[in-house]
Amino acid sequence: MEGNLTPKSLIDLDLVRKAKAGDQAAFSQLMGKYRDSVFFMILKMIHNRDDAEDLTMVAFGKAFNNIQNYTEDFGFSTWLFRIATNNCIDFIRKKKLQTTSIDQPTASYDGEMAPVAVKDKTATPEESIIKEQRAQKMRDVLQKLDPKYRQLIEYRYFEELSYDEIAEKMDLPLGTVKAQLFRAKDMLFQKMKDTKDRY
């Protein structure tokens, strides 16, 4: 199998094998190697830099979470780009559903034209309290994270800094920030899930 691979694919294969064994540095190297090309491919599909940035992180997140499922029958980059493309297609489909015009009536199942009913999304006092409680719970869970990961989450989601700004503040390579931020989000999600399961 390896005899059929290009030198580039052999390097990827070595990194993937290390990543499968839990080597975080290998994850960071793979991300650093393909981040820009994945980002620009996504950007061509959706034409929005912020969404493309988020979808790039999602693609790497899915790839890293499912790295054990990667088979060596084809290149890692092929597998990664397929994940990214499928994410984009799902995102575009959801976006189309969300951007249905509320000004134009739509055809109902019997062919009659009917206006689109839009639910009032203004929070009730009770919903506002619940939202505040959830935000507080998230901050409580956040305190249980390793300080390095906690800082990343705070910079990105509470201070709304860009990845570049975080890299500069923490004096870290951009690829490392992105890889560690993904790990931080995953850890936060798992802790939130564990907290929810206990109550």
Image (spheres, rainbow, N blue to C red):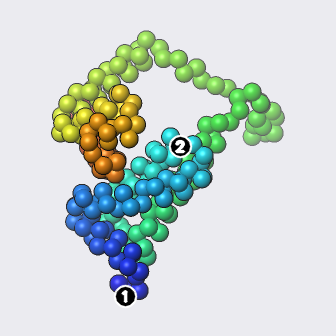
Q: CA distance from mark 2 to mark 1?
A: 39 Å
Q: Closer to the N terminus: mark 2 or mark 1?
A: 1
Q: Residue at x 75, y 27 (%)?
A: 103
Where 110 sits versus 154, above or below? Answer: below
Q: Quadrant of residue 22?
A: bottom left
Q: Quadrant of residue 152?
A: top left
Give the label on residue 197, or none: none
Foreground pick, 98 / 155: 155
Is 51 positioned to the left or the right of 32 in the image? right
Are there few (<14), some (14-19), or many (20+) residues within 10 Å of tag 2? some
Query: What element does badge 1 sit on?
Result: helix
Q: Residue at x 18, y 36 (%)?
A: 147
Where 169 sits versus 45, above or below? Answer: above
Label 2 belongs to which residue?
Answer: 49
Query: What element does badge 2 sit on?
Result: helix
Single out the residue that lies furthest toward the top: 125
Quarter holding the C terminus? top left
Disc 2 marks which amino acid? Arg
Is 106 positioned to the left or the right of 57 in the image? right
Foreground pick, 199 / 163: 163
Give the label on residue 3, or none: 1
Disc 1 marks which amino acid? Gly
Residue 151: x, y in percent?
25, 34
Q: Residue at x 39, y 74 (%)?
A: 8
Is 84 positioned to the left or the right of 70 in the image? right
